[in-house]
Amino acid sequence: MILKYATLTLTLLASPWLAIAARAESVLASALAQLNAVGPMGLGNEAAQNAWREVASAGAEQLCVVLAAFDSDKPLAENWLRAAVDAIAERALAEGSGLPAEKLEAFVLDSSHAPSARRAAFEWLARVDGTARERLIPQFLNDLDLEFRREAVEHVRVQAQQRLEAGDESAATALFEQAFAAARDEDQIEALAKELEKRGKQVDLVRHYGFVSGWKLIAPFDNTDERAFDVAYPPEQELRFSARYPGKAGAEAAWVDHTTSDARGLVDLNKAIGPVKGAVAYAYAEFASDSEQPAEVRLSSVNAVKLWLNGELLLAKEVYHSGTALDQYRVRATLREGTNTILLKVCQNEQTQPWAQDWSFRLRICDKVGTAILPSRP
């Protein structure tokens, strides 16, 4: 009986504090919602100013709650939220109350959170924990955030270089291989590939990037005066690979098989079909997926292009001679289980300058961080 009354007394004493804490959480949640409601052209800015003051006054124990609000993926709101995080953390350190390091570390390691929020948490964690950077960076080698992954790849590369300087070629090569497998940024991929090739290791860049190398090609259709970008030639209406069609200037257009031997997946239409100015080529490929899955189709071409996946137009860029940077165009898509069809239209114009002679493309299929999605069958 005494224990029962003691428990009741403690509950009654705690109740006001629980109620206060619940109200504080409710006020913070409301303020965060107002910040996430900020829109373009200053929409919601007045309400956001009051909300920001409320959020910025929160205690350090609420830092991860504020950081989690980044997950709404609203850039305008994120500016307010990042400023609030900095204000909370700076005040806590100035007052000597410290930051919740364990919670911040768990937040950083949770890749489901927004990359910018994880980065903010990491920076503040590193301020209060001198071991955090060295401990955590190796754990980012396969991270979904490219910035964290890049740091981890560089960390392994430096380790490899140190093993080389120590005369341990075998260990260095193994570390270079580990870094290469994790690398997703082109500069790191290319540099690590050279290191491996220097050590006699064969590097398959086509596989690493996920380039599609086997195609059926047909050309030349007429693109005089750049008039054919929106002309639906037969390959846009039917796919009969035994068919032959009237082409540009009386030429016959017929499908041919082509597999590029380029180490970086480039399909050079001038070599595969023959140089033709003011012309259109189509390229067709099939991609087998063992399940329905999200993907990105990434395309580079110096020419005007249209891209279809499974008959759906994903991309149309009527731009000529704009460069061929890796992943020039990135399109989110869904691969269906089984066979997926890819159709590409590549338009060449009639410019005669030497730099305007390229007629080419390269296309790869990967996930959102650039990890190759490989076909389930050849």
Image (spheres, rainbow, N blue to C red):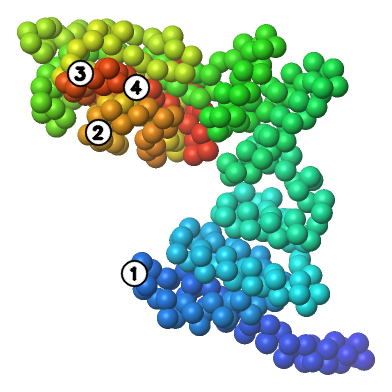
Q: Nearer the viewer, mark 2 or mark 4?
A: 2
Callout 1, which amino acid? Met
Q: Are marks 3 and 2 in contact (CB under 8 Å)?
A: no
Residue placed furthest toward the front: 353
Q: Are marks 2 and 4 in contact (CB under 8 Å)?
A: no
Residue 256 x, y percent position in the rendering = 27, 7
Q: Secondary structure at mark 2?
A: loop
Callout 2, which amino acid? Val
N-terminal of the two: label 1 or label 3? 1
Front residue of 353/263: it is 353
In this figure, which residue is indicated by the disc labeled 4?
Answer: 361
Local packing at callout 3 (Cα closer than 10 Å; few below 14, some 14-19, many 20+) is few
51 relative to 172 in the view: left or right: left
Local packing at callout 2 (Cα closer than 10 Å; few below 14, some 14-19, many 20+) is few
Compute the Cα span from label 3 to label 2. Answer: 16 Å
Identify the residue at horizontal 30%, vertical 21% (top origin). 355
Can you say whether 288 is above or below 118 in the image?
above
Compute the Cα span from label 1 to label 3. Answer: 45 Å
Image quarter for residue 167? top right
Compute the Cα span from label 3 to label 4. Answer: 19 Å
Q: Secondary structure at mark 1?
A: helix
Front residue of 40/357: it is 357
In this figure, which residue is indicated by the disc labeled 3?
Answer: 352
Callout 3, which amino acid? Thr
Can you say whether 232 is above or below 252 in the image?
below
In this figure, which residue is indicated by the disc labeled 1?
Answer: 41
Can you say whether 29 is above or below 338 in the image?
below
Local packing at callout 1 (Cα closer than 10 Å; few below 14, some 14-19, many 20+) is few
Residue placed furthest toward the right: 2
